[in-house]
Image: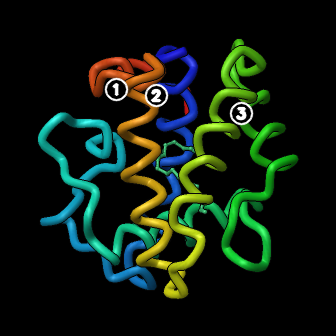
Amino acid sequence: TAEVMSHVTAHFGKALEECREESGLSAEVLEEFQHFWREDFEVVHRELGCAIICMSNKFSLLQDDSRMHHVNMHDYVKSFPNGEVLSGTLVELIHNCEKKYDGMTDDCDRVVKVAACFKVDAKAAGIAPEVAMIEAVMEKY
Ligand code: BOM
């Protein structure tokens, strides 16, 4: 659900500042991670892909090939309130997007495509949070 997704985004987003330098993602492109879900934010920058890889690695959510670690992602999402109602759907949506871009060899370029696909599919599935929902739970993490 969008409510659970707001918690996951609030927590995951805390890792952005630790990853800014090595990813090269400027505040002009993305100031706060929750803006990822804004209607007018375009998920297109290679540096965002690099940042998502760096952030995911802080929580062991990726395998060595920079694809999702299914078990760890399941467990991560399940760790949030009501997480078990979202974990299966989230893993399935991300994996479906990974399959579409499997041929891309540059990890940062590929992950930003996967993230853009996930944003579209999460909206369609009704699990995309409003930015205000994320801001309401930010203080918990
Ligand atoms: O193949 C690479 C897998 C990358 C998974 C991350 C894609 C989605 C990242 C953008 C949105 C994040 C919102 C919440 C955290 C989900 C883990």
Marker disc for residue 77: 3
Q: Which residue is mark 1?
A: 135
Report how far apart the C-alphas of labels 1 and 3 lie in the structure: 18 Å
- Residue 136, position as x, y percentages in the image: 37, 18
Q: Is residue 50 above or below residue 124?
A: below
Q: CA distance from mark 2 to mark 3?
A: 18 Å
In the image, taking residue 116 as reference, residue 85 lies left or right, namely: right
Disc 3 CB within 8 Å of nearest ligand 1 atom = yes
Q: Residue at x 79, y 38 (%)?
A: 74
Left-right relation of 7 to 84: left
Image-quadrant location for residue 63 = bottom right
Q: Position of residue 28 (x, y in %)?
A: 13, 66
Q: Residue at x 66, y 27 (%)?
A: 89
Identify the residue shown where x is 27% and y is 71%: 45
Residue of label 2: 139
Which mark is first along the chain, 3 or 1? Answer: 3
Nearer mark to the viewer, of 2 and 3:
3
Specify the amino acid type for callout 1: Glu
Relative height, residue 33 to residue 49 (above, below): above
> Residue 104 — which label?
none
